[in-house]
Amino acid sequence: MALRPIDNALPTITQERPKKQPKIVVSTQKQQPRTSSNDENQVPSEPTIDYISSDNLKPMSDPEAQIQNLIGDLDSKNWVKVCESLNDVRRFALYDSSLLLPILDKILLVVVKSMKNPRSALCKTSIMAASDIFNAFGDKLFDPSTFEAFDGLLLQLLLKASQDKKFVCEEAEKALGSMVGSMTPLPLLLKLRVSVSHTNLRIRAKAAVSLSKCVSKMGIEEMEEFGMEKLIEVAADLVNDRLPEAREAARSIATSVYEAIIKNVEEVEEKMEVWQSFCHSKLTPINALSILKIVKP
């Protein structure tokens, strides 16, 4: 008996594929409050500080009265107010320095404090104030009343000149230049000598640059008063420094010493003998060779 194919034994049932349900997307973002068209895309910003050059600063309208509130304004908790007051300090330094002199020690302390502030605008304004103070008072900063405050100011300027923030660094270098240009080299050299041995190599380099500028301003008598041997020792300490600025400062100092040593010597060969004799008598053999390599007749 023939069998029917099994495929024909049961009725064929076709199943429909289930339809996909539409996905419902629920946003997890918070709805932003509606704002008017005028407020759209606006981001709150901090006050803008204008950096005013010394040439554009105007005198105080009533300096005798305004000097009474200066210290209190500088001590404000509002950093914008402090910036404005530092610009007032600059105005007093430029036009009414005699009124500022009795409180100069307090002013220097505020300037140093502002330089330490993390706000770049406040820091830069204080550095600009330091420049105007140097130009106005010069050697008066060596007076006993401001002696220690000046030490703190010098250290902060060297620190800021060593920073990575370019506009702060450049302003600090300008202030150091004003300091060197407005003060007698010898007493300033004594202060810079300490910083040239600083453990921070950037501070050391910036101090070396300022010191070399001081030496270049000095006459032979001043150099001899400080000590030719001390100057050449400073150059020898810096000649192999890790930073190019320090090495270039060493070259400049050694060149100044060389020119002073051989000033009255005419013959080239004799200049070389005098220079070699000086270096070998004041320095270790290794340091003497280092100096003789960078400065030759």
Image (tube, grey):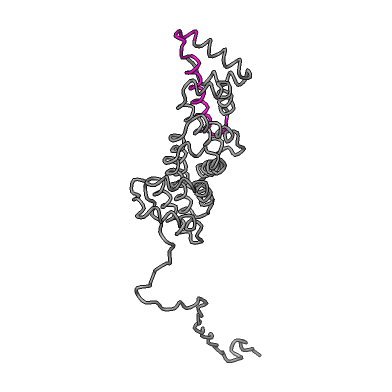
Farthest residue, direction right: 1
User: Residue 296: x and y, percent?
Assistant: 49, 16
Left or right relative to 123: residue 234: right
Give whichever of 181, 284 is nearer the camera.
181
Label total for image? 0
Residue found 51% across the figure and 29% down from its top: 186
User: Residue 115: x and y, percent?
Assistant: 51, 49
Question: Quadrant location of the N terminus?
Answer: bottom right
User: Residue 4: x and y, percent?
Assistant: 61, 89
Residue 50 inside the magenta-drawn segment? no
Q: Is residue 228 above or below residue 24?
A: above
Left or right relative to 5: residue 215: left
Most common secondary structure along the magenta stretch: helix
Q: Is residue 200 above or below residue 273?
A: below
Residue found 39% across the figure and 49% down from its top: 91
Specify the segment rendered in magenta.
Answer: 241-270
User: Residue 283: x and y, percent?
Assistant: 61, 19
Residue 249 inside the magenta-drawn segment? yes
Give whichever of 261, 59 is nearer the camera.
59
Give whichever of 3, 141 is nearer the camera.
141
Q: Is residue 235 above or below residue 93?
A: above
Q: Quadrant of residue 7?
A: bottom right
Q: Is residue 205 above or below residue 57?
A: above
